[in-house]
Image: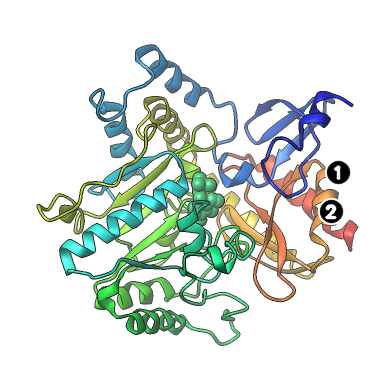
Amino acid sequence: MDSYAQNRDRLLTSSRPRPDFEVVGSQGPWLHCADGTRIFDGSSGLLCTNVGQSSPKVHARIDEQFRRYSFGGAAVVQPRIQMELMDRLCLAVGRPADSVALTTCGTLGVEVAVGLARNITRVRNGKLRGDILASTLSYHGMSALTLALAGNHARRPRPGDALGLGPSFPAPYPPTHVHEGHGCTASCADEIAKEIDSRGAENVAAVLIEPVNGTTGGAFVPPDGYLHRVSEVCRDRNVLVIHDEVLTGMWRTGTPLASQHWDDCEPDMVILSKGLGAGYTGVGAVLVSPEIAPFIRHEDADALPAMGTMATHPLMAAACLGVLDELEAMDFTAFAARGERLGQAMKSLNGVGPVQDTRGLGFLYGVEVTPGQLWPVMKAAEERGVFFYPFTGAGDPKSEGLVVAPPLTSSDGDIDFLITALSSALDAVG
Ligand SMILES: Cc1ncc(COP(=O)(O)O)c(C=O)c1O
């Protein structure tokens, strides 16, 4: 037995089946395997390698910073590169006056946002408790707190270990709500109003929500008007709205932020992560609107939440600047056209072989298949040179499918390849 086979069970990574191709090189959205073949990354790694791999722009930025100095926590040197990142990021996503907290990953971004929301609403509104409400079909990270708040059935702790927390309101998606012609309207946001009122608004700090669902349900899109109604419900009750755009932010759905597909639903805080580090670095960024940021500096406010030893790491900030260089150099007209083409192709897969439903926006789609068919489809796709990230959602039996989310810098030829390989895999499984 070789050392890989001997050691693989000692490395505690994931309970899911692991791919067995060995990667020895990469270029953009393609991985080069030891046996001389290449495979297309159909879900951008874990929905993060948004500008592909081996970017010269990212490399140049890291190299430049490495030659200056590598470590410099906030209390050690002036955080100039972090401020440069903050400025570029806020401009890029259309929130130029926001304040920003930087962390090392999405989970810690959510944790910091929770801390800030509690602090702000205590100072601003004299809240008694800092409850955070999240939906039944959501994922907000892997810490004990974020797992206990969210509804991801596969990762939630056992009831006895769940700290008595969430999830708190039904997600606006099947099976709790059906929409898009099946009857549900944005009024399903009123479930949130009921929940806040039953706890007492004085006990609720924030509603935490993914504006477009990520991997928990497979790229569900809320009904038009839903996010606007959530904002109204919360504003009327002095409850903050936090959008978790860890997965959907940085153009994944076609716009800088997923919430920008709709009017009048700008959140008080946004959390970004995957597409900002783009797989080159761990990072999380919490953007706080200028309307509420002053409360963080108020004399009655608590200290800022601790962001962690590595939170403002200069090499991490340099990598993110390189990612922004890549994103801002994109041809946005061609990018929009490719997203449109991908969307049309996903729509046309409805009913093909085991496909039960497709949904999504921009460069993010869920392809739901008949229960039991997910792993055969994944295998057939891999045999055709493309791999995808799987999802298992809600319902009984649980919905299942794959997330189609190629790197945003994929070419026309790459997108054609993905569509052809996936269609053929679905046909083959039947
Ligand atoms: C919506 C959402 N929030 C939070 C997280 C946690 O981010 P991380 O894995 O970087 O801690 C994820 C990760 O998949 C996510 O999809």
The spot of residue 297 in percent (x, y) is 15, 49
Q: Residues within 10 Å of mark 1 (few under 14, many from 20)?
A: few
The spot of residue 168 in percent (x, y) is 46, 74
Q: Quadrant of the N terminus?
A: top right
Decide: is 334 above or below 424.
Answer: above
Q: Which residue is mark 2?
A: 425
Q: Quadrant of residue 84?
A: top left
Q: Amino acid at mark 1?
A: Glu
Q: Which residue is mark 1?
A: 383
Q: Amino acid at mark 2?
A: Ala
Please report contact status of discs 2 and 1: CB closer than 8 Å, yes or no. Answer: yes
Decide: is 419 above or below 412.
Answer: below
Does residue 79 show up?
yes
Q: Which one is in front, 167 or 172?
A: 167
Q: Is residue 196 left or right of residue 403?
A: left
Q: Quadrant of the C terminus?
A: bottom right
Q: Which one is in front, 358 or 190?
A: 190
Q: Residues within 10 Å of mark 2 (few under 14, many from 20)?
A: many
The spot of residue 39 in percent (x, y) is 76, 36
Q: How is the image coloured?
A: rainbow
Residue depicted at 76% across the width and 38% down the height? 9
Residue depicted at 46% across the width and 49% down the height? 107
Q: Is residue 420 left or right of residue 367?
A: right
Q: Secondary structure at mark 2?
A: helix
Does residue 247 show up?
no
Q: Residue furthest bottom?
A: 183
